[in-house]
């Protein structure tokens, strides 16, 4: 048994080392901060013992905001709950600042062999929503219009915010969700070979040992009629997180009267940015947000 656990941990560390190489590439190739955007980096939003959780804020300077402030996008990076950073993903989502959004990109606690992080990473992003509301006036944000957006594992956490899973705290509620190829049903996802390792690291044990924990961590298990309008974007040929994960959540949301839309990107697998297969998803995302949560008009100004 001990030898088996060592083997599992060795495989896990090999996988993490591979992920580190991908992340190093991401740091080199991440997009530049868009022109006309002011950045505040490494702001501490949560203290947990000796751990500090940080966020970056991207504020558009060439937008004349309404008196109420601009809507905010809480950007949550992916990485299988065990990798990734706020840096690259924040700069990617910061492209939406030109449409009149303040983008807040967050880090959260990451899992590793022997150190599962559910539900602490959800607690992190919930606290990030509270932080945005408490500090909204300092960054020109309307605290009544917060969008949760994430990719892959970050999309999973964004959808949990949208369903407000297990929390009655109104301060953690978001007004819309954009989930790019993120898992929504961890119980069914556990049947995919490529998901076994990250799910076991994240939740602590295989599905058979803790089925209730897998269910509790699944957005689809928390759907109710007061959930946030949700846009789900998924690659048609995703072999890591099947496209059915997005379709099924959308169907469940619509069944209880919550606006939900799915964009399936043809011929694309897992992990992609806003510009993919000759398509720019940015304007489509903004159009959804404006349909689902009409906001005061903003006007671009030249400087």
Image (cartoon, helix red, strand yellow):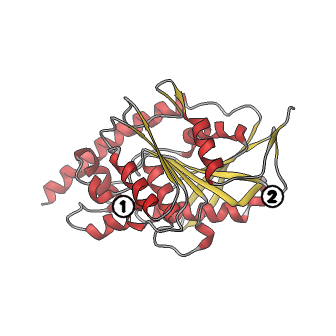
Q: How many marks?
A: 2
Residue that carries the numbered disc 2 in the rendered image: 68
Which of the two marks, 1 or 2, is nearer to us in this view?
2
Q: Which disc, if any, is residue 116? A: 1
Q: Which disc, if any, is residue 125? A: none
Secondary structure of the residue carrying numbered label 1: loop
- Image quarter in which the N terminus is found: bottom left
Residue 95 visible here: yes
Q: Which residue is drawn at 54% across and 76% down?
A: 168
Label 1 to label 2: alpha-carbon separation: 40 Å
Q: From the viewer's side, name the closer residue of 66 and 35.
A: 66
Residue 109 visible here: no
**Image: 15 above or below 294:** above
Expressed as whole percent of the image width and height from the top left, the position of residue 208 reads 20, 64
Q: From the viewer's side, name the closer residue of 23 and 212.
A: 212
Q: Which residue is drawn at 26% across and 54% down?
A: 190
Location of residue 69 (image quadrant): bottom right
**Image: 214 above or below 95:** below
Q: Which of marks 1 and 2 is nearer the N terminus?
A: 2
Q: Crowding near pointer 2: few (<14 within 10 Å), some, many (20+)?
A: some
Name, please, the residue furthest toward the right. 303
């Amino acid at each position: 048994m001990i030898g088996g656990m060592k083997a599992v941990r060795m495989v896990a560390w090999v996988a993490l080392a591979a992920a580190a190489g991908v992340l190093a590439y991401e740091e080199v190739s991440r997009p530049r901060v868009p022109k006309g955007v002011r950045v505040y980096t490494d702001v501490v939003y949560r203290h947990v013992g000796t751990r500090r959780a940080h966020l970056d804020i991207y504020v558009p300077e060439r937008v004349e905001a309404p008196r109420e402030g601009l809507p905010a996008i809480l950007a949550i990076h992916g990485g299988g709950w065990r990798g990734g950073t706020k840096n690259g993903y924040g700069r990617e989502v910061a492209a939406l600042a030109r449409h009149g959004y303040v983008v807040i990109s967050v880090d959260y606690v990451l899992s590793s062999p022997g150190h599962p992080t559910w539900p602490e990473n959800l607690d992190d992003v919930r606290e990030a929503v509270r932080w945005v509301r408490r500090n909204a006036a300092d960054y020109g944000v309307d605290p009544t219009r917060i969008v949760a957006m994430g990719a892959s594992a970050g999309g999973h956490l964004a959808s949990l915010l949208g369903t407000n899973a297990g929390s009655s705290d109104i301060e953690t509620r978001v007004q819309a969700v954009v989930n790019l190829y993120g898992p929504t049903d961890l119980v069914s996802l556990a049947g995919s070979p490529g998901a076994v390792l990250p799910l076991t690291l994240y939740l602590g044990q295989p599905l058979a040992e803790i089925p209730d924990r897998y269910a509790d961590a699944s957005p689809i298990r928390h759907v109710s009629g007061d959930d946030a309008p949700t846009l789900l974007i998924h690659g048609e040929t995703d072999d890591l997180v099947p496209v059915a994960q997005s379709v099924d959540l959308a169907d469940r949301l619509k069944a209880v009267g919550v606006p939900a839309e799915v964009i399936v990107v043809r011929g694309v697998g897992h992990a992609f940015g806003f510009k993919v297969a000759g398509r720019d998803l940015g304007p489509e995302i903004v159009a959804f947000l404006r349909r689902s949560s009409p906001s005061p008009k903003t006007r671009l100004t030249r400087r």
